[in-house]
């Protein structure tokens, strides 16, 4: 083989393994799913039904409820977690603290545990008959709760579980961001007489913005795809009050075998995520300008 | 005086946060030694009891747990190694060569990063059925390798690698693959470590896709086994499940405690750079 040809083939030797796998297991299924979303699966074969799956979803009460539940979790949990993470990040960054490494290690740990194990552990903590949380409530003289028997309580348990798992990860992201903020800025502000709170608003928040944006959108994305926790803690119940979008899609596809409807629903989810990603890119660009 | 007060407050908050973060880990280990009644008894919550072996026995009889552990280890290790090979090569190919359509191909790959996994779950399941891969580790490994994140991460890291070194290796007569393996890859250890750690943790905890394509108990991975043990309608032996949870925790935790610093940096590598 002559040298020139070799040179031209070289990139493809490196790219071929990935691109072949990508074509078969990513590009093709994405296209296939798009086609499926216009079909109905029954008796082992697919038939074309136009936009009926989308129409069905837009009038299906349970799909709306799953969207609503997911957004309720998102709107309540993401801000609480982000603010907590920011506080932990700032505290760990404080010059007053020694043993930063140890706190960092402990606070980071929840992200390591696999989603199934920690969901099971939280289901035991909140077990209505003798779970740790109810025992603690009893000890301080409060009534125990049937945590998985009422929609609101079940939602709260899910939010507590996610917050436990992901606050540490986001705290460490914030900490990394804070460590990049120049100390000179704070010194200059102190000389000008700005107090800690003013410094936080005028220096920390703006400097931290890229990291903050990443953390928030990453959390939103994760919440939109919430599956393991509701599937194991509540199975979407009671009475579908913790049904999330992805749990709905999973059940539609693999319990009811409505492949077409599930594909259509997954494209609706993809659209929501795409819209959010565009907003994220927008916010980031403003930041650079 | 004020300084001392704020110092105390910070330490108290961080200590409470640390306890909350670590407590479920410790509790899981304690609970794996409990019988069902001890597990739900307030007085025993923080005490080790003697039922670990009985729980393990119970776990072994209700699930082929060692098979499942082996499946988890096998899938996670093979997947992680392949991700490192495939994605580093692709990242290198995208960064250090110029060819027609390069930016377009990379852009297409990037766009799929936005698309949620659920879009491909039905067609991939149909594909796995056609390939007769249902219940096989290959069904977890191969589709996982199609993810673009690792390529993106490696590409970012390769961008800073000096072209002169590649050029001089070529002039010395080394082939492209040789150059990659002996000149470029060794200098990229931190990037490999980051991607390896991220892939390992993600695959070790993978649940939704195995739930779809693995349905014989012998083919289950650990998370799948645990999720089946707690399924409603069974007689649930919680102590046994906690033993399983400990088995699931040990590798990641050991990995983390040994390589703590690399580990945190690795897990963060997708974050701050992006």
Image (spheres, coloured by chain):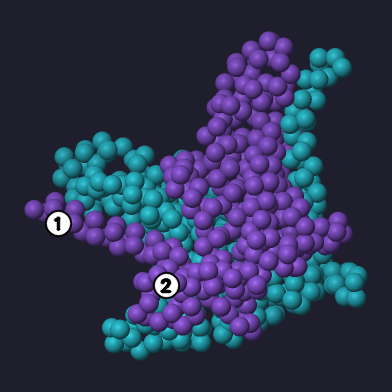
**Does B230 appear above or below B154?**
below
Please rate how many residues cluster around mark 1, counting C-alpha atoms within 10 Å: few if below 14, some from 14 to 19, many from 20. Answer: few
Residue denoted by label 1: B5
Give the colour chain B carries in the figure: purple
- B135 or B56: which is nearer to us? B56
Q: Which mark is residue A267?
A: none
Residue B20, horizontal then vertical, whole percent:
36, 64
Host chain of mark 2: B
Residue A6, horizontal then vertical, whole percent:
81, 20
Task: Indicate which label's residue lies in the foreground, 2 or 1.
Answer: 2
Residue A21 in view in this figure: yes
Q: Residue at x 63, y 77 (%)?
A: B231
Same chain for mark 2 and mark 1? The answer is yes
Residue A33 in view in this figure: no
Q: Earlier in the sequence, mark 2 or mark 1?
A: 1
Q: Residue at x 64, y 18 (%)?
A: B166
Q: Residue at x 55, y 36 (%)?
A: B191
Please rate how many residues cluster around mark 2, counting C-alpha atoms within 10 Å: few if below 14, some from 14 to 19, many from 20. Answer: some
> How far apart are the two marked residues, 2 and 1, measured between alpha carbons?
41 Å
Q: Residue at x 80, y 49 (%)?
A: A24
Which chain is rendered cyan in the image?
A
Host chain of mark 1: B
Q: Dot 2 lies on which element?
A: loop
Q: Which mark is residue B49?
A: 2
């Amino acid at each position: 083989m002559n040298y020139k040809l070799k040179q031209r083939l070289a990139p493809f030797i490196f790219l071929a393994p990935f691109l072949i796998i990508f074509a078969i297991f990513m590009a093709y299924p994405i296209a296939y799913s798009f086609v499926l979303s216009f079909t109905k699966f029954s008796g082992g074969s697919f038939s074309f039904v136009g936009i009926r799956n989308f129409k069905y979803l837009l009038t299906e009460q349970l799909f709306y409820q799953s969207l609503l539940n997911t957004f309720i979790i998102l709107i309540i949990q993401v801000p609480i977690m982000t603010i907590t993470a920011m506080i932990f990040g700032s505290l760990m960054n404080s010059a007053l603290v020694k043993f930063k490494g140890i706190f960092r290690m402990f606070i980071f740990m929840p992200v390591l545990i696999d989603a199934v194990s920690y969901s099971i552990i939280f289901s035991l903590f909140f077990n209505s008959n003798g779970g740790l949380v109810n025992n603690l409530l009893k000890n301080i003289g409060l009534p125990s709760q049937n945590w998985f028997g009422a929609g609101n309580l079940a939602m709260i348990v899910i939010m507590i579980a996610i917050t436990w798992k992901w606050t540490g990860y986001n705290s460490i992201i914030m900490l990394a961001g804070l460590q990049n903020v120049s100390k000179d800025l704070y010194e200059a502000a102190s000389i000008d007489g700005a107090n800690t709170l003013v410094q936080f608003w005028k220096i920390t928040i703006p400097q931290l913005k890229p990291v903050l944006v990443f953390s928030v959108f990453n959390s939103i994305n994760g919440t939109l795809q919430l599956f393991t926790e509701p599937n194991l803690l509540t199975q979407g119940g009671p009475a579908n009050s913790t049904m999330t979008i992805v749990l709905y899609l999973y059940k539609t596809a693999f319990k009811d075998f409505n492949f077409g409807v599930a594909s259509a629903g997954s494209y609706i989810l993809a659209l929501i995520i795409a819209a959010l990603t565009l907003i994220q890119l927008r916010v980031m660009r403003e930041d650079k300008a | 005086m004020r300084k001392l007060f704020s110092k105390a407050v910070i330490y108290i908050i961080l200590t409470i946060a640390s306890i909350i973060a670590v407590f479920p880990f410790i509790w899981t280990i304690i609970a794996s030694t409990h019988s069902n009644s001890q597990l739900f008894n307030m007085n025993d919550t923080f005490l080790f009891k003697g039922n670990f072996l009985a729980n393990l026995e119970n776990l072994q009889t209700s699930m082929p747990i060692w098979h499942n552990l082996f499946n988890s280890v096998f899938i996670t290790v093979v997947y992680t190694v392949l991700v490192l090979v495939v994605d580093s090569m692709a990242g290198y190919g995208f960064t250090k060569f110029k060819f027609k359509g390069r930016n377009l191909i990379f852009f297409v790959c990037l766009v799929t990063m936005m698309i949620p996994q659920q879009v491909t779950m039905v067609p991939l399941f149909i594909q796995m059925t056609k390939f007769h891969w249902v219940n096989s580790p290959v069904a977890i490994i191969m589709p996982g390798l199609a993810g673009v994140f690792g390529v993106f991460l490696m590409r970012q890291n390769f961008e800073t690698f000096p072209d002169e070194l590649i050029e001089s290796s070529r002039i010395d007569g080394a082939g492209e693959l040789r150059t990659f393996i002996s000149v470029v890859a060794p200098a990229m250890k931190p990037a490999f470590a980051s991607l390896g750690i991220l892939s390992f943790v993600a695959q070790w905890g993978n649940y939704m896709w195995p739930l779809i394509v693995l349905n014989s108990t012998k083919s289950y991975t650990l998370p799948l086994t645990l999720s089946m043990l707690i399924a409603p309608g069974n007689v649930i032996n919680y102590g046994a499940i906690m033993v399983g949870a400990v088995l699931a925790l040990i590798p990641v935790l050991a990995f983390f405690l040994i390589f703590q610093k690399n580990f945190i940096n690795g897990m963060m590598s997708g974050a701050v750079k992006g």
